[in-house]
Image (cartoon, rainbow, N blue to C red):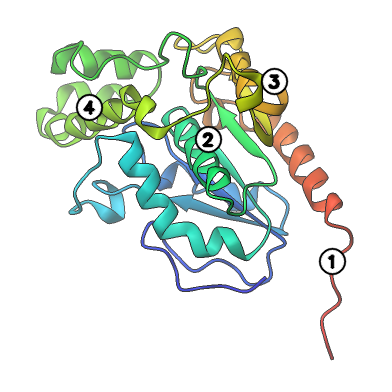
């Protein structure tokens, strides 16, 4: 697989020897570091490429987004040449599921190369009750305690006002992204003809306090191919129960690799 110049939302250049690129989109308030352990957990032919949104971690000084449509446009500009080069899939977790799906939908509308498959984790289909709260529903203390309750924040943060002052504005802007999902021009779930020509596997944690399996299953109304996989754990099951999650994800990745046929022999 050839490689273009690295995108600004990626921490490195993609691997030229990969047979499949897996672009990973993080949760609200999170960052690319959520996927730091993934390269060692997936098949070696898969290049894990965590996508870093601005305003956090390595892109801390950049302006944050608040609008889902703007995020998708920026991702398509930044990643478009890489997504056109060869087979790719995407995993999105919580807010990242919304962004991964919206990016795939935008590319398919434009006639560009879509994913071999989408993997969506811990997020209700957009027409269902929102997975995450409205950005201004809670004051800072309430929002921080909510984040702790569902595993999105270590309890130590509650004792550090300076940490919360830095984190909570990021979380609120990400919640605004989720609340603006209609601006990302997703398919109409009531129109079967609008379903996207792609395969989706959605993951739901059996103990997720924010979203139940039926709300995740509702993604079936947006794509022609759909599977729901339930795995142990709460809202952050890839971190809480990695073994069963990666067992299922890797079976799907192996299937995508097998569909490509055997690796091409190196010249020489």
Give the quadrant of residue 171: top left
Q: Quadrant of the C terminus?
A: bottom right
Residue 172 disc label: 4
Give the quadrant of residue 204: top right
Q: Residue furthest bottom?
A: 268
Q: How far is the residue under mark 1 from the one under mark 2?
A: 28 Å
- Residue 178, image x and y in percent? 35, 26
Give the quadrant of residue 233: top right
Is 246 left, or right, of 94 in this rendering? Answer: right
Q: Residue at x 29, y 13 (%)?
A: 146
Disc 1 crowd rating (10 Å Cα; few below 14, some 14-19, many 20+) is few
Compared with 107, 171 (above or below) is above
Q: Residue at x 42, y 30 (%)?
A: 95
For the residue pair 114 and 140, the one nearer the viewer reads as: 114
Q: Which residue lies under the disc numbered 3?
A: 228
Q: Are marks 1 and 3 in contact (CB under 8 Å)?
A: no
Disc 3 crowd rating (10 Å Cα; few below 14, some 14-19, many 20+) is many
Residue 232 appears in the picture as rendered: no
First in sequence: mark 1 vs mark 4? 4
Is 62 left, or right, of 42 in this rendering? Answer: left
Q: How far is the residue under mark 1 from the one under mark 4?
A: 45 Å
Q: How far is the residue under mark 4 from the one under mark 2?
A: 21 Å
Q: How far is the residue under mark 3 from the one under mark 2?
A: 15 Å
Residue 101 disc label: 2
Disc 4 crowd rating (10 Å Cα; few below 14, some 14-19, many 20+) is many
First in sequence: mark 1 vs mark 2? 2
Q: Residue at x 19, y 29 (%)?
A: 168
- Residue 250, image x and y in percent? 74, 41
Q: Which residue lies under the disc numbered 1?
A: 263
Q: How many marks?
A: 4
Say what secondary structure mark 3 lies in.
Answer: strand
């Amino acid at each position: 697989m050839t490689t273009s110049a690295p995108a600004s939302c990626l921490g490195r250049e993609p691997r030229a020897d990969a047979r499949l690129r897996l672009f990973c989109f993080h949760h609200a308030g999170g960052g690319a570091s959520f996927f730091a352990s993934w390269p060692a957990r997936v098949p070696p032919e898969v290049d894990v490429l965590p996508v870093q949104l601005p305003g956090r971690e390595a892109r801390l000084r950049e302006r944050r987004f608040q609008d889902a449509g703007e995020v998708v446009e920026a991702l398509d500009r930044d990643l478009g040449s890489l997504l056109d080069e060869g087979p790719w899939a995407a995993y999105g977790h919580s807010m990242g599921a919304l962004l991964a799906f919206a990016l795939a939908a935008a590319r398919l509308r434009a006639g560009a190369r879509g994913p071999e498959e989408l993997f969506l984790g811990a997020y209700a289909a957009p027409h269902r009750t929102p997975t995450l709260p409205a950005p201004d529903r809670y004051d800072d203390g309430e929002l921080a305690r909510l984040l702790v309750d569902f595993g999105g924040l270590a309890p130590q943060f509650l004792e550090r006002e300076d940490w919360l002052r830095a984190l909570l504005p990021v979380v609120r802007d990400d919640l605004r992204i989720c609340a603006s999902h209609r601006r990302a021009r997703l398919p109409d779930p009531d129109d079967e003809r609008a379903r996207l020509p792609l395969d989706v596997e959605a993951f739901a944690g059996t103990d997720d306090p924010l979203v139940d399996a039926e709300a995740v299953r509702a993604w079936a109304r947006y794509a022609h191919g759909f599977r729901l996989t339930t795995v142990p754990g709460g809202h952050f099951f890839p971190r809480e129960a990695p073994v069963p999650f990666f067992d299922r994800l890797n079976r799907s990745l192996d299937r995508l690799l097998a569909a490509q046929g055997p690796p091409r022999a190196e010249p020489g």
